[in-house]
Amino acid sequence: MKTTFTEKQMHILTVAEELIAKKGFEGTSVRDISSKAKINVAMISYYFGSKEKMMANLYHFRVQKTREHFAEFAETIKDGRPEMQMREIIKYLTTQLFKYNYFHGFVTQELRHTEHLKQDLLDFYKLCVEKIDEIIKKGVVTGTFSFAPKPEDVLVNILGSTLFTIRNKNFIELSVPFKNEEQYMKEAEKKLRNSLTFTTFAILGYVID
């Protein structure tokens, strides 16, 4: 079930996300958020209860928006060749996870499994599986793909590999050339995407030119 945020809440969450993306959760204070949002500090408590609860709402808000955007994105590629669609799905998911990587260090097991957040994630995963399944079936019917792996396994491979890459910089940086954090993230994402494309097409029985 979709949660409806008021215009004021969305404004606060948008500002908070901008700041947290730059300074991290710990480095962003309630005063920073209220100052940039041009509201009284007490409004954070009024609308969300605490900084931690505001972050939970922000995560909820972001997952809802990503699900909506993914549905729109999937519609734009539906008439493309199966191999193109699969490449775009991999690109979309990895890009989104890297773009919003600051959530991964904050969102604890407990937070992720509160009911409304768990349902949000489940709805998003189900939508991804549905779209991946459509692509696989189209590829098999047209002879583009030789095999039909389970779509949920394809999704798990994409999400799991991406989250591992984001959370294990000390390991990934051993094989990624970089001079600064921005370049590292760019190169790590590029390396991951190439790897995921290779492994995904391998289990589909599609030979990359």
Image (cartoon, rainbow, N blue to C red):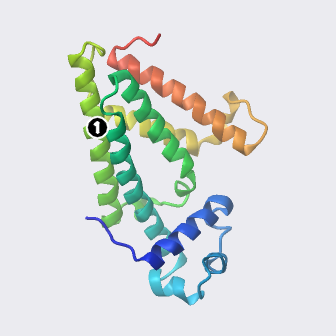
Place of residue 150 in the rendered image (x, y in percent of width and height, measured from the top left): 26, 29
What residue sits right under mark 1 in the picture?
Answer: 131
Q: Which of the 4 image quarters holds residue 32?
A: bottom right
Place of residue 12 in the rendered image (x, y in percent of width and height, measured from the top left): 53, 75
Indicate whether 69 appears above or below 168. below
Lateral position of residue 148 relative to residue 72, left or right: left
Indicate whether 73 appears above or below 132. below
| Residue at 73 percent of width and 30 percent of height | 177
Which one is in front, 39 or 183? 39
| Residue at 35 percent of width and 46 percent of height | 72
Which one is in front, 60 or 143? 143
Lateral position of residue 74 relative to residue 62, left or right: left
Mark 1, secondary structure of its residue: helix
Indicate whether 196 appears above or below 166. above
| Rendered-image quadrant of the N terminus | bottom left
Place of residue 71 in the rendered image (x, y in percent of width and height, measured from the top left): 33, 47
Place of residue 124 in the rendered image (x, y in percent of width and height, measured from the top left): 33, 50
| Residue at 45 percent of width and 39 percent of height | 92
Which one is in front, 141 or 189? 141
Amino acid under disc 1: Lys
Neighbor class of circle 1 (other Cα within 10 Å; few <14, some 14-19, many 20+) is some
Lateral position of residue 183 relative to residue 188, left or right: right
Label count reads 1
| Residue at 48 percent of width and 35 percent of height | 91
Return the residue found at the far right. Answer: 179
Lateral position of residue 34 relative to residue 74, left or right: right
Q: Which of the 4 image quarters holds residue 144?
A: top left
